Amino acid sequence: MEIVILVVVIAVIVLGAVSGLVISGRKKKALKTEESATPTSTTTAPTEPQLGEEAEGAPEAPRRTIEEVGLPEAEAEAPVIEEPAAPAEPEIETPEPSAGRLVRLRARLSRSQNSLGKGLLTLLSREHLDEDTWEEIEDTLLTADVGVAPTQDLVERLRERVRVLGTRTPQDLRALLREELLTLVGTDMDRTVHTETRGAVDRPGVALVVGVNGTGKTTTTGKLARVLVADGKSVVLAAADTFRAAAADQLETWGKRVGARTVRGPEGGDPASVAFDAVKQGTEAGADVVLIDTAGRLHTKTGLMDELGKVKRVVEKQGPVDEVLLVLDATTGQNGLVQARVFAEVVDITGIVLTKLDGTAKGGIVVAVQRELGVPVKLVGLGEGADDLAPFEPEAFVDALVGDE
């Protein structure tokens, strides 16, 4: 009997233990399920709001009428930035014919040279021409930069002819003075600007323009292009002054005004190379003339003068240079002769261009420079206008000196 009771007790204990284990396992499983379904606020980042969540718990705002709803302002249009217009090409001009220009500009020349002609006529009109009077005549000529030797020659001829003439009327004196001044200036010199090809027939004529800084050399080159175009020639310009930044632009502007091509190189480049290319391009284009503007050089700078000689030598590889024009400022007077001598030694000057002749009373420089170099004055500048460069005509020049009867 005791055994039976013992077995029942053991069975009850075993059953209770099994039931406890089952209940404990269910509680643990339920706890794990709950923990996995409920996120903790301290370790998990908030999730993105889902559809409908934003409206939950938010009171609905009163709706506005259509009149209360403002339309969105139109976006301001971005300002239109206009591209800068390219500078208009200058219209091609028809230059004034070169023939007779000096006659048309005679009034301008007369104003500047009036003191020379009138001074001489006044002195020669004196009743008694004593030594003091002749000295005054000499001083008048020297002041006008005629030069010592030409002045002495002129005074001697005047003294002889006045002595032979005897009674002198104003008309006689004017005719006498005109004749002697013409002899002094020279009427038998070739004043043509030679732009015709010499030697090789398959290239244009070549003119080299040289001179000291400040004489108006680049402007003169541009004006000379106008003279040639007016005479029916096609022109190519060579901007071989590569050391002055504005020189090439200035020359190109002159060229565009008359339809002339300008050949240029890099700033500070080799001038001889630019000159060579210009002659080559002029030949290919069938141009009549190539004008080469060189850098203005101080005649005291030996190296720069040597470079000028190089430009001429390089150009001559394609044929001879037909004209070498030295530009001189008439207002510099006798100082211009010093410059002329040095240039003549380097590049063999064939003609003179006198600029600013309307701005000086020293027209005698025409005589002096011709006597010094043995080459003629071929062109004169008589103003700032585009067509104020004129072929030099001795008769018109002397007429401007002595005035009208």
Image (spheres, rainbow, N blue to C red):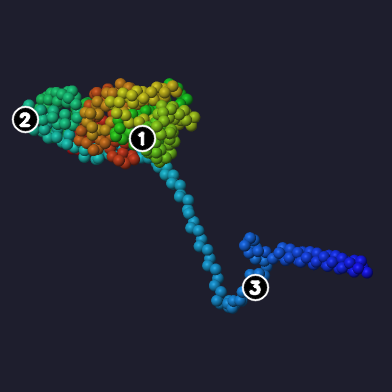
> Is residue 316 toward the left or the right of residue 36 in the image?
left
Determine the secondary structure under disc 1: loop
Label 1 – label 3 distance at C-alpha: 82 Å
288 sits left or right of 141 in the view: right
Q: Which residue is denoted by mark 2 in the rendering?
A: 128
Q: Amino acid at mark 2?
A: His
Q: Residue furthest right?
A: 1
Q: Secondary structure at mark 3?
A: loop
Q: Quadrant of the C terminus?
A: top left
Left or right, residue 354 beside residue 13: left
Q: Is residue 215 above or below residue 63?
A: above
Measure the alpha-carbon separation of dots 3 and 2: 132 Å
Residue 150 falls left or right of residue 255: left
Evaluate whether residue 243 shows in this view. Answer: yes
Q: Nearer the viewer, residue 216 or 174?
A: 216
- Name the residue tied to disc 1: 244
Q: Is residue 375 visible?
A: no
Residue at 18% in and 23% down: 149
Q: Residue at x 33, y 33 (%)?
A: 217
Say which label, 2 or 1, has the lower sequence index. Answer: 2
- Residue at point 34%, 23% (across, down): 306
Residue 338 is tagged as none
Measuring from the top left, give residue 340's x and y in whole percent.
Answer: 27, 26
Disc nearer the start of the sequence (3/2)? 3
The residue sitting at the front extreme is: 2
Amino acid type for the residue under numbered disc 1: Arg
Q: Is residue 313 above or below residue 115?
A: above
Residue 366: x, y in percent? 24, 29
Closer to the eye: label 3 or 2 = 3
Looking at the rendered image, the disc whose residue lies closer to the viewer, 2 or 1, is 1
Residue 393 quadrant: top left
Name the residue that disc number 3 marks.
Answer: 56
